[in-house]
Every structure is written in C-alpha cells, then in structure tokens.
Image (cartoon, coloured by chain):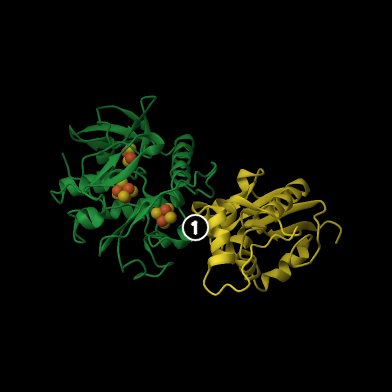
C-alpha cells in the first residue's frame, strides 16, 4: 500500500521525499505555479502554489507530502489569493501584453487567464526597468521579469554555467548578469542554453523568433495552462 | 421605449479601437438597439452624460480633461466599465511613463524629425498633460473590466447580454485575452 494524502478530498499517492506539487502532478492534478519547474530545485518564491495543509498555508512546491495530510487547493479563497499575487506581479513590473513577443505563450499571462483575472486591481508602479539587447541572439527585457529564478537555476543546473543571479531586496530586487560589464554580450550565455529558453515570461527572449507563431495561435490562446502543464511538465518520481 | 437601458461610452487616452471592436457586433447592434439607448457617446454626439445605467470607458487618463470626463461618467453611470488594455493598465500610451514629460514634448514638437515651426502647444484651450498615464481604476471605482486590445465583439456582446438579462457578467476562458 502506498502512502496517501488528500487533495481537495481526493486521495493522492506519494513516495517519501516527494513534495505536494510532485505528488499532485504525478496524479494528474494541477496546482498553479510560476517559479516551480519539475527539472529544477524548487525555489518557493512566487507563492502561487499556495495550498492549505491541515489548516496552514504552505507552498506546494517545497512542502513535503506526508501521510494523511488534508490539503486544500481549489477553494475560492485560495484562488482569490492566487489572483491577488498574480495582480501584484503585473503591477510590480511593466506588462504591456499587446506589445510583448511572448503574449499567448507566457505562463504569467496563462496563469492570469486561468484565474479569470480581468484587471490588475492595484495601483501600477511603472517602475523604470531597462533592456539588455547587447547579445546578438538573446535579449533581456527587465520590465517583464518576475524574479522566479528559473534562469538562475537553469544556468547552474542544466548549463553548468552561472550566467544569472538575483540581486537587491524588496522593491530594489533585480536580475543581474554575470559578466564584467554586466551585459549579456560579455557573459557565457549561448542561444542554445537551457537558461535562454526557460523564462516563463517575456523577460528572456531569443531574438528574431518573437513572431514566428502569430498571436491568436499560441499555447494559451486556446488551451488552459492546467492542461498544458500536465501534458508537458513531468515530475521525476521519488 | 421608456424602459430602455441607457448606455454612455467614451474614449479617453485610447485609439477608438475598442469602439470599433464594439461596432463589430454587426447586425447584433439592431437587437441591442431594441433594449438600449445611447447617451453621451461618439455614436450620438451627445456632449454630457445624464443618468445612465452603463458607462463604457475606453483608454486610460493622460490629461486633465480625461479626469473630468471620467468623473462625470462615474457620477452619472450606475455601472462603470473599464474597456480594453489602456483603461485597465494604461496600455500603449502609458509607455511614455518611462520618459520624462518634458523630453516627450521636446521630441514631439521641437527636436523630432520633420517638425516644422517648432513650438510646444500651449493654447489655454488644450487640456494639461498628466506626468504619467494612469489606468482608470486608480481615479474612480470601476465595477467591471473587459480586457483585450481590443476586447473582441463577442466580449462586448457577452457582457451586455449578461447585464441586460439580469445575470452577473462573466467571461469564459476563450474571451479573456490581454492582447
Ligand atoms: S511577459 Fe507575459 S504578462 Fe508580461 S507583457 Fe509579456 S505576455 Fe504579458
Ligand atoms: S528573467 Fe525570466 S526566468 Fe529569469 S528570473 Fe526573470 S522571469 Fe524568471
Ligand atoms: S510555484 Fe511554489 S512558490 Fe512558486
């Protein structure tokens, strides 16, 4: 008999060492997430995967599954919290989707659509953020960075490089590039790197590919992110 | 006639694209006209709002006149709706928020390529520009939001028919787009 916990009343089997996210995904249940990616060490920073475990809020991507846990995910209250978190991400950066190459393929947008987010609720920061178009093949638009650290982790764990890091705290937090000049062109990044393709938003883009698929025919234009996520992100077991 | 729903519409810092998209409901406009009467709107040329049931606002606020119009709508409309990306987050016009206003004006009216008779417009009739373009929910309370650049005709139709038929408006997944 494998061990189980319940997720929204449904029994979910798990193996020791698995997180709630890993077990749920393996059982075909989507928990909204942005900073989580099954191939990289969980970071637990975006809080979108917030679930209630035995009465307490936890991040499903970092919290270990244990026998008999009572986990709530798809409640009105939790989804409202997730929507507020997503709205904060939108007003903290500068997300003008109609002029963004990633629109329709963007996970931040996909999650927002999934949560039926119709507005940004909070006052906009209109923070001044820069672009780095110095590299011949890869560019960064800092306006769209949500500090998920996926590029940081992918560069270290998949590319065995160390191109990105997050620097500063709170409102001054920003993505930095590991090179003498601080520019992408002087870093070790290569257009074939995992780190150049992992960004869930339109912050790291491969040049000259932005409109190869027309708007309206993109991933989340017709398919919800829960379905896409379960079809494409596979958790390693154990 | 007497019990028609009164609708007002306006474009603030917008491009009228949302209004054009609204007109894309095509022949359904006839059906709408049976239930709805337009008050202040580019469609009627009525200059000021009277008591209305629904106000549709396209565009964010970029100048003092936008603020006055928005407040007039809020005062006169039971239900006020932010229509389109610019009303919701400032949209394309808000991309000037990262450039100081003086630089914007200098580039557009003094130093820009092909500018003739360079001078910054200062006629007292002209509304003053705000230092930043703002979405409308930062100025007045907004009751509903229709995202999209522009929202499709089906978004307008779904929203208005929901309201007219007494349902709480809701947009299904296929109708929610930010682009
Ligand atoms: S990164 Fe995503 S949410 Fe941000 S502007 Fe681009 S498509 Fe929109
Ligand atoms: S650039 Fe993209 S992948 Fe890197 S931290 Fe920002 S949002 Fe995440
Ligand atoms: S997905 Fe768990 S905190 Fe981001």
Q: Nearer the viewer, residue B142 or A164?
A: A164
Residue B112 appears left or right of B127: left
As drawn, the residue found furthest toward the right would be B2
Residue B169 spot, x, y in % from top left: 62, 51
Looking at the image, which residue is at 65% across and 46% down? B143
Q: Secondary structure at mark 1?
A: loop
Q: Nearer the viewer, residue A11 or B167?
A: B167
Residue B155 spot, x, y in % from top left: 58, 61
Please say whether residue A145 is visible from this viewpoint: yes
Residue B29 spot, x, y in % from top left: 70, 69
Up the image or down, B144 lies above or below A134; here it is above
In the rendered image, what is the letter of the chain coloured yellow?
B
Q: Chain of mark 1?
A: B
Looking at the image, which residue is at 64% across and 46% down? B142
Residue B17 appears left or right of A3: right
Ligand 1 neighbours mark 1 (CB distance < 8 Å): yes
Name the residue tied to disc 1.
B178
As drawn, the residue found furthest toward the left would be A160
Residue A121 spot, x, y in % from top left: 55, 43
- Total number of numbered discs in the rendering: 1
As drawn, the residue found furthest toward the top would be A55
Q: Quadrant of residue B56?
A: bottom right
Q: Nearer the viewer, residue A214 or A143?
A: A143
Q: Colour of chain A?
A: green
Residue A97 appears left or right of B46: left
Looking at the image, which residue is at 62% across and 49% down? B136
């Amino acid at each position: 008999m494998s061990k189980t916990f319940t997720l929204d009343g449904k029994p979910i089997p798990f193996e020791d060492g698995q997180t709630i996210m890993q077990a749920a995904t393996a059982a075909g249940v989507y928990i909204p997430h942005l900073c989580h990616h099954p191939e990289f060490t969980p970071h637990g920073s975006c809080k979108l995967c917030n679930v209630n475990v035995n009465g307490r809020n936890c991040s499903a991507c970092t919290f270990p599954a244990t026998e008999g846990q009572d986990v709530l995910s798809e409640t009105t209250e939790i989804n409202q919290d997730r929507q507020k978190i997503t709205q904060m991400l939108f007003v903290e950066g500068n997300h003008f989707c109609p002029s963004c190459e990633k629109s329709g393929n963007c996970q931040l947008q996909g999650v927002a659509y999934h949560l039926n987010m119709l507005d940004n609720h909070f006052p906009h920061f209109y923070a001044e953020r820069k672009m780095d178009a110095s590299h011949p093949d890869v560019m960064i638009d800092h306006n769209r960075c949500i500090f998920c650290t996926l590029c940081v982790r992918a560069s270290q764990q998949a590319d065995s490089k160390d191109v990105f890091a997050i620097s500063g705290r709170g409102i001054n937090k920003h993505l930095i590039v590991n090179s003498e000049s601080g520019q992408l062109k002087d870093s070790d990044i290569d257009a074939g790197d995992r780190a150049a393709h992992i960004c869930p938003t339109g912050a790291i883009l491969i040049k000259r590919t932005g409109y190869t698929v027309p708007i309206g025919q993109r991933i989340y234009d017709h398919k919800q992110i829960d379905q896409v996520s379960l079809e494409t992100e596979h958790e390693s077991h154990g | 006639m007497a019990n028609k729903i009164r609708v007002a519409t306006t474009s603030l810092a917008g491009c009228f694209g949302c209004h054009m998209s609204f007109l894309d409901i095509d022949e359904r406009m006839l059906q709408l006209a049976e239930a709805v009467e337009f008050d202040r709107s580019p469609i009627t040329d009525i200059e000021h709002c009277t008591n209305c049931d629904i106000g549709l606002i396209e565009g964010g606020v970029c100048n003092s006149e936008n603020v006055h119009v928005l407040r007039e709508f809020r005062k006169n409309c039971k239900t006020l709706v932010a229509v389109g990306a610019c009303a919701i987050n400032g949209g394309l016009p808000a991309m000037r928020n990262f450039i100081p206003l003086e630089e914007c004006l200098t580039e557009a009216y003094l130093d820009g390529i092909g500018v003739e008779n360079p001078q910054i417009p200062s006629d007292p009739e002209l509304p003053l520009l705000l230092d930043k373009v703002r979405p409308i929910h930062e100025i007045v309370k907004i009751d509903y939001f229709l995202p999209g650049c522009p929202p499709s005709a089906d978004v307008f139709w779904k929203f208005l028919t929901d309201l007219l038929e007494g349902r709480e408006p809701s947009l299904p997944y296929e109708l929610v787009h930010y682009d």
